[in-house]
Amino acid sequence: MRRYVVRLLVQLVVGVIGISLLAFFILHVLGDPVLLLLPQNAGRSEFERYRHLLGLDQPLYVQYWKFASHAALGDFGKSWYADTPAFALVLERMPPTIYLTFAGLLVALLIALPLGIVAALKRHSWIDSLCTAVAVAGQATPLFWLGIMLIIVFAVRLKALPASGYGTWQHFLLPSFCLGAALAPITMRLVRSGVIEVMNMEFITTARAKGVAERTVVVKHAFRNACIPVITVLGIQFGQLLGGVVITETVFAWPGVATLTVESIRNQDFPVVQCAVILLALLIVSVNLIVDVIVGFIDPRIRTGP
Amino acid sequence: MTAVSASDKADLVGVAETPATKAAEPRATLRQLRRLRFGLAAGAVLLLIVASAVLAPWLSPHDPLAVDIRHRLAPPAWMELGTGEHLLGTDQIGRDLLSRMIYGGRVSLVVGVSAVVISATIGVLLGLGAGYFGGAIDWAIMALINVMLTFPFVLLALAVIVVLGPNLVNMIMVLGVAGWPIYARVVRAETMAIREREFVLAGRALGMSHARIVFRQILPNLVSAIVVIATLQVAQVIIAESFLSFLGLGIQPPTPAWGNMLGEGRVYMLNSWWIATFPGSAIFLTTLVINLMGNALRDWLDPHMKV
């Protein structure tokens, strides 16, 4: 178990370094911050002076090292826009994003688990076909369009729920449903195929043969084992889930990290963008790590495997 | 997934009839046929969408950019106040919605297909390299894949587009470069399995070069998997493109794209629902038929494919 965790930790460090490199180079190689900071009519000497001031005239690896060694201590520089430390700005927006992510995940599981299990147990029935059809349609629905439609129906027409904002539990309903509905189809398919696979296993036949009630077979024997692929894939897909969070936050004006990042990208506020991207990546990588450890605990074959 | 060998392909020609296919139960065969029919229907719809995009200048009743302020926010023809002049109504500055929809399809399809070609090329090359050579090359490429998969791809695309400037070419590049890991992962796994097969060993023994083995012996076995992923990815790219355009970071107005039409129409949703609803439905329909086609293609080529 220890070797397994160490290997995962090494992967985590490599992942975070890789992402910091990516974030750094995208913004430093592709764009010239000075061009964005100074007015267009500024003179050549002015540009040179600013480049020197920001350390942009040094070799890239020196710049990266400076950036990374500061970032490791939580210093991502000051926001060019708000004149406050980028780290504090991003950290402040983190809780709403995390709440939304888990609320969405919860909704997805609430939809996907029962439907997936029923579809698997009643394979080839009309319920199964209906679930598959809904899943295929759901996968084709653009998340932002779904969000807009939800706003129109529930906020504009029915005036039942707030269209955007943050604060009360009502504010959570539309965004988390939107996110959950986007995640549910793939989860449902995973649950379905997981349960189908497990139901054909010998230990299920054994359980049935020794007279265990069908309900107990499904709940205790099949479901637990079917959970493993679901947890793994959801863990791997956490990055994709955060992509969905970005879209949901934008549509519902949710005050999370993603909205902040999109705003900062628009304002060309590089320190905040870098900080947000790296912290989000850190979040994703840690979730992946936790998932891997959990799966390792549930299924010993995985941690002792090659 | 098992590789599609020549004999498998021979079976596939007569999917339902040959006794050699794995579908032993008649029910499964029927289901397969039904799925195939779905796929064919989806393909037909997709063909219609592609044709309308290609023939846009001849099909669209109006100039998609022609502003007609007097007839702004006209509802679709079947509603009260709607006219046959504008079948799907007009937008906030009186442009004909049907014409804009037809032209908007061009953007989605061009971006979808070009980006997929780019990401498939990168992904297949890296996947073949990692799977065939293994060792340090494999480790480095896998590390890159993991980093790419960890990164929230939407944010990456946003950042690059803002830095480079929003236009068609940049968007294709960004979406193309962001999409390769999924191909690389599948191709790598398949290559690793095929590398151990006898015909590769035979090729080595005959003195074939690595390049010849990789591209002439291994790659043909992977074509069906690549085609299936690519088909499904076109739908993903179209959704991503429309989201970028929706945010105002993709195709710039006045050029019509489904995404930016949806974004502009959002403001007028309350009274003029049609401006945002039609482009949204177009995105939905297009991605739906592409997904259906991709699924049918997978079932037809190889039902055991893990894509």
Image (cartoon, rainbow, N blue to C red):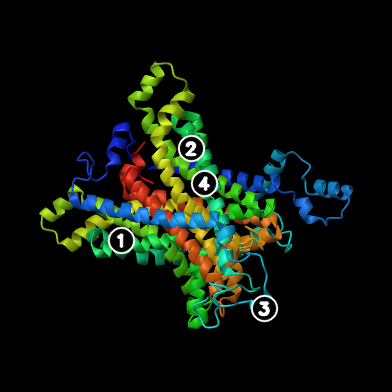
Query: What secondary structure is marked by label 3?
Result: helix
Between discs 2 and 3, the one toward the N terminus: 3
The residue where tag 4 is placed is B116
| Mark 4 or mark 3, earlier in chain | 3
* Residue for badge 1: A116
- Is label 1 in contact with label 4 (beta carbons under 8 Å)? no
Whole-number angstrom distance, CA of label 4 to CA of label 2: 12 Å
User: What residue lies at 51% left-to-right and 70% top-to-bottom?
Assistant: B277
Marks 4 and 2, the one that precedes in the sequence: 4
Cα distance between the residues tagged 2 and 3: 53 Å
Q: Chain of mark 2?
A: B
Q: Which residue is mark 2?
A: B124
Residue B4 image label: none
Q: Residues within 10 Å of mark 4 (few under 14, many from 20)?
A: many
Where's residue A263, x and y in %?
65, 63
Secondary structure under badge 1? helix
**Identity, as a three-letter code, of the amino acid under mark 3:** Arg
Between the C-alphas of marks 1 and 2, the distance is 33 Å
Q: Is residue B183 left or right of residue A275?
A: left
Residue toward you, A215 or B209: B209
Q: Marks 3 and 1, how far apart in space? A: 53 Å
- Local crowd size for mark 1, using a 10 Å CA cut-off: few (<14), some (14–19), many (≥20): many
**Comparing marks 2 and 3, which lies closer to the viewer?**
3
The residue that mark 3 highlights is B70
Judge if badges 2 and 3 mark residues of a common chain: yes
- Name the secondary structure under disc 2: helix
